[in-house]
Image (cartoon, rainbow, N blue to C red):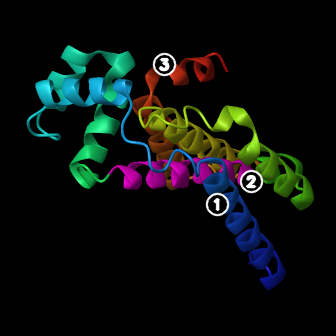
Amino acid sequence: MPSKKNVLLFITLTIIVVILQFIIARKHILYGLTSDDWYLLAWYKQVVENPLLDMTKAWKEIGAHNFARVYYVGTLFGIFQYNFPLYHIFHTLLKALAGLSVFPVIYALFRKRFLAYLATFLFSIHFSTFANLDGIYSGSPILVIVSMNLFLAIYLWAARKHNFSLKIMFILLMLLLAASFFDIARFYPFLLL
């Protein structure tokens, strides 16, 4: 059971990471969709009528490389319609979540809280985690980062505790499949491991 001090530190880190992400993205929040976003949205509208029933048809027509991006932009359009600041706010929150997902991996690897806090902070402000600030379509690789970090953290925890129960294996399988579904091209390097 985590102590109140550790919970308070993690909440403080979460607040800092979210605020930093919004400071970095502040100029882009009022942007509309980029030409790449509109292209993917038009592709989604052309191929998909029902998001759940047309998934296999869309996979065949769009292809594995672009499927996740097209569905990501299309799903966000289904939720937010033409309210463009909400796209960017959601995207910024997703980047903050990706930054925070580094914490359990580093902590599970090294068992040093300060190192995990520092790594999370540095990952959150590093330029590579920002992806494309003005485009929405780069959200699917962020989902890959989150699912792979959770996969690695749970795997390391289970290996340390020698607890590879059926439930843990199912969770690991779902996270691995989610990572491959969110963006198959970003998932390829993991297959080499």
Q: CA distance from mark 2 to mark 3?
A: 24 Å
Near mark 3 (Cα within 10 A), the count class, few <14, some 14-19 or many ≥20, is some
The C terminus, quarter of image:
top right
Report which residue position mark 1 lands on.
Answer: 18
Residue 128 sits above or below residue 96 on the image: above
Regarding residue 163, the answer to whether it shows in the image is no
Report which residue position mark 3 lands on.
Answer: 185
Which amino acid does the dot numbered 2 rest on? Answer: Phe
Mark 1, secondary structure of its residue: helix
Report which residue position mark 2 lands on.
Answer: 103
Residue 184 sits above or below residue 107 on the image: above
Residue 88 lies in the magenta stretch:
yes
Q: Main secondary structure of the magenta part?
A: helix
Image coordinates for residue 118, horizontal then vertical, percent: 86, 52
| Residue at 83 percent of width and 81 percent of height | 5
The N terminus, quarter of image:
bottom right
Residue 111 in which image quadrant: bottom right
Mark 3, secondary structure of its residue: helix
| Residue at 45 percent of width and 23 percent of height | 184
